[in-house]
């Protein structure tokens, strides 16, 4: 029987990582109910949107629902099992988002394109391949600076881009599967300031966030495990904002 490295035992104590079980019948039922709610969400900005843009409501409501179709926060194994289906939906959604920008060449501001379009677009970009994420990141960042996008929308995209480039993340939004089927918090830069950074971006406390994935947070254990985790995942760059 292969021994578990000491650093991994410490790491699992930090986030209380555990193998992700197959989704229960109740979890699947809850997920399907969540998608049904998204599929009928009203557009809160409908009254102020130009008539010429109101056709986007139905389109992006479906984009939002399809983006979340198999992304179950409480059980990431569900996405793995349905990845071929979700990958197809993600590809279709990205085509819709790319077409939107090709036509309008601007961020879908709420009072112009609607809340559903803005939120769905942000999620599609979050789940897009790295080149697409990097392409749209300056656009989302500018919208954030103008007060049009929440910090909790910008921060995860920044973390994803840093992760894909083997850099530290800043906001602790990204988990990493290490070892197989065990999820831990991907290396965070200056972890002592993580709580303050998350608060500044309007994000929930890290312990509450990890609880969504049935993980528990232990700052000191995480700090002890971090050097070995960085080495194991070959993280070699400072985060880029």
Image (cartoon, rainbow, N blue to C red):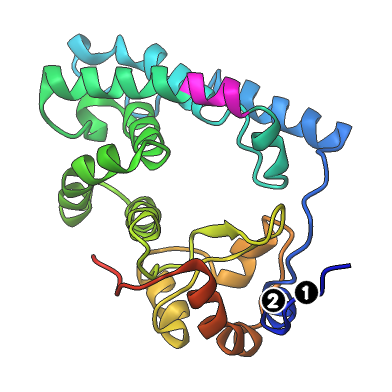
The image quarter in which residue 117 lies: top left
Judge whether residue 49 can be spotted in this image: no
Task: Mark 1: give few (<14), some (14-19) or many (20+) Cα within 10 Å.
Answer: few
- Residue 161 lies left or right of residue 102; in this view the side is right
Q: Which mark is residue 4?
A: 1
Say which element carries label 2: helix
Q: Position of residue 169 (x, y in %)?
A: 40, 67
Q: Which mark is residue 79?
A: none
Q: Position of residue 200 (x, y in %)?
A: 35, 71
Residue 79 versus residue 151: which sits nearer the camera? 79
The image quarter in which residue 222 lies: bottom right
Quadrant containing the C terminus in the rendered view: bottom left
* Residue to which mark 2 is pinned: 8
Task: Say whether marks 1 and 2 touch (CB < 8 Å).
Answer: yes
**For the magenta stretch, what is the residue range?**
83-89
Q: Is residue 118 above or below residue 145?
A: above
Judge whether residue 237 can be spotted in this image: yes
Task: Mark 2: give few (<14), some (14-19) or many (20+) Cα within 10 Å.
Answer: some
Q: Position of residue 186 (x, y in %)?
A: 52, 66
- Residue 86 lies left or right of residue 61; in this view the side is right
């Amino acid at each position: 029987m292969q021994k578990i490295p000491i650093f991994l035992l410490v790491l699992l104590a930090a986030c209380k990582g555990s193998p992700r079980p197959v989704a229960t019948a109740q979890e699947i039922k809850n997920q399907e109910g969540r998608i049904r709610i998204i599929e009928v969400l009203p557009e809160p900005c409908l009254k102020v949107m130009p008539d010429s843009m109101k056709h986007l409501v139905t389109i992006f409501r479906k984009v939002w629902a399809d983006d979340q179709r198999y992304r179950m926060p409480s059980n990431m194994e569900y996405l793995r099992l349905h990845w071929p289906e979700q990958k197809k939906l993600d590809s279709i959604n990205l085509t819709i988002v790319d077409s939107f920008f090709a036509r309008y060449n601007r961020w879908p501001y709420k009072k112009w394109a609607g809340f559903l379009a803005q939120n769905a677009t942000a999620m599609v970009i979050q789940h897009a391949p790295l080149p697409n994420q990097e392409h749209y990141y300056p656009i989302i960042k500018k919208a954030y600076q103008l007060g049009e996008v929440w910090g909790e929308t910008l921060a995860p995209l920044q973390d994803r881009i840093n992760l894909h480039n083997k850099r530290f993340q800043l906001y602790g939004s990204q988990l990493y599967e290490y070892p197989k089927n065990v999820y831990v918090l991907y290396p965070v830069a200056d972890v002592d300031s993580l709580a303050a950074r998350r608060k500044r971006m309007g994000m929930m406390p890290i312990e509450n966030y990890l609880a969504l994935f049935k993980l528990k947070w232990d700052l000191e254990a995480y700090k002890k495990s971090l050097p070995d985790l960085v080495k194991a995942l070959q993280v070699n760059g400072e985060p880029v904002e």
